[in-house]
Amino acid sequence: MPLTHPDNTPPPHRSEVAVNPIFAREPLHVPTYDFPAQGTDPEVAYQVVHDELMLDGNARLNLATFVSTWMEPHANRLMAECFDKNVIDKDEYPRTAALEDRCVRMLAGLWHAPDPHHVVGCSTTGSSEACMLAGLALKRRWRGTGTPNIVLGADVQICWEKFANFFEVEPRYVPMEGDRFTLSAEEALRRVDENTIGVVTIMGSTFDGSYEPVAEVCHALDELAARGGPDIPVHVDGASGALIAPFLDPELAWDFRLPRVASINTSGHKYGLVYPGIGWVVWRSPDALPDELVFRVNYLGGEMPTFALNFSRPGAQVAAQYFTFLRLGFDGYRRVQQECRDVATRLATEIAELGPFELLTDGSHIPAFAFTLREDAGSYSVFDVSAALRASGWLVPAYSFPANRTDLSVLRIVVRNGFSHDLADLLLDDLRRALPRLEAQTAPARGRESAGFAHGAGSHH
Ligand SMILES: Cc1ncc(COP(=O)(O)O)c(C=O)c1O
């Protein structure tokens, strides 16, 4: 059974695409599922693929994803120039390797590493791979004798569930309770023991955009160690927030300023403002990454240390990340992220003023917020609201929360670079227009079974 979207099961009548007369070429059928016996003219092949992709959603109207959907034309040009470079081949592409190294040092500086020039870190495909690597380093550093466990909030992204499953670490989730949708220091402390490899804290929950109390968790673990208890490191999953907080909340100590923070990851392709395909992980010092996890290969010429799940990866994303750091600088990032926060908080306020909605968060942490329907809102569900917005082209996901708040279903809006106040006004207009129709319903038309893609949020455990 191939791993495809359920909508993609091959209907028998769509086993071929007819080229003539659509593209006025030689009569030809292009197979959809069978491997083509012959080649196709590049113009025709391009048109066939292009036409099918027209039916994908409009990326800029996708308010579900955290991933960048706009870059400057210069970035496009630079990426096209680097399409043929493989980031693993540091000997053949030493300048790409140098750019990667500089990005790591820049991030280490932003995150207040004690000595940014002596951290270790690398680029990855995204935060999922970065989290796997950080989790593996924690597991290897652990010296317990029982079954290793990791403590995390029920709001973690699905990549942590994968980590625990793939690498056989017992996940100890702190469930949500009432209005607490994140990990708390007290609840984390109740679950740790001498077999805990680490505690994961999130800067920017996938579920509602809120920052977890990293400093409180660290202080609680400091006290535990001071009392003679286990000395447990913390990893910060800053997939989104690690490139928001340094610019917008410089006073907030969530990073390497806290001595207990061993490693931090982020997605270059989220608020790092690069197209999909890049993440970063940085360890506070070389001893936080056990050397035995680093492989050295020499079959590309030269001796290359690598710590990654993938081998070959595109170099273009690394060049694009370095370009964006140069292009915007600290002040540029601050302005882009501040604009996103301004749009998010304004949109959240106006949605709350519409009447039927209640905010869970207001966009003042990462520029993403979740809202639900008031109990007296009428006979429609958040899933109906999502479908109504979909009819106007907006992708606003609706999904239910994990334990112990599976009763709660929400809508979430992620504001990214390129989602302007003007677009927010258009979204509000469409939402306002949809409400009378929804209010005329006598019963909810859709339940949680209609939940679509929510970028790794959803009740997965
Ligand atoms: C907190 C958090 N961690 C990890 C991930 C996974 O990141 P990626 O999609 O870059 O693999 C996400 C994605 O939304 C996230 O929000």
Image (spheres, rainbow, N blue to C red):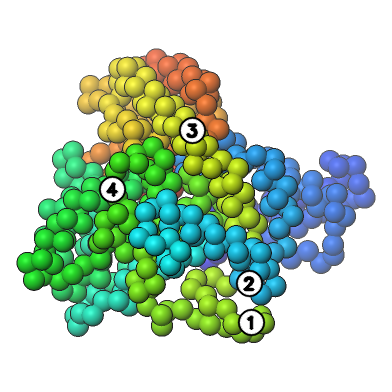
Decide if residue 138 is on the left or right side of residue 57: left
The earlier-in-sequence mark between 2 and 4 is 2
The residue pinned by badge 2 equals 90
- Farthest residue, direction left: 227
Q: Is residue 53 above or below residue 60?
A: below
Q: Position of residue 281 (x, y in %)?
A: 44, 61
Q: Residues within 10 Å of mark 4 (few under 14, many from 20)?
A: some
Decide if residue 270 is on the left or right side of residue 234: right
Question: Which residue is pictured at 34% across the width and 71% down the height?
Answer: 288
The Cα–Cα distance between marks 3 and 4, rounded to whole angstroms, is: 21 Å
The Cα–Cα distance between marks 1 and 2, rounded to whole angstroms, is: 9 Å
Label 3 secondary element: helix
The Cα–Cα distance between marks 1 and 4, rounded to whole angstroms, is: 40 Å
Decide if residue 138 is on the left or right side of residue 432: left
Q: Position of residue 458 (x, y in %)?
A: 35, 48
Q: Position of residue 158 (x, y in %)?
A: 37, 56
Which of the 4 image quarters holds residue 59? top right
Question: Which residue is pictured at 24% across the width and 74% down the height?
Answer: 148
Residue type (three-letter) at the residue carrying disc 3: Arg
Task: Confirm or deny contact between disc 2 and disc 4 (CB under 8 A).
Answer: no
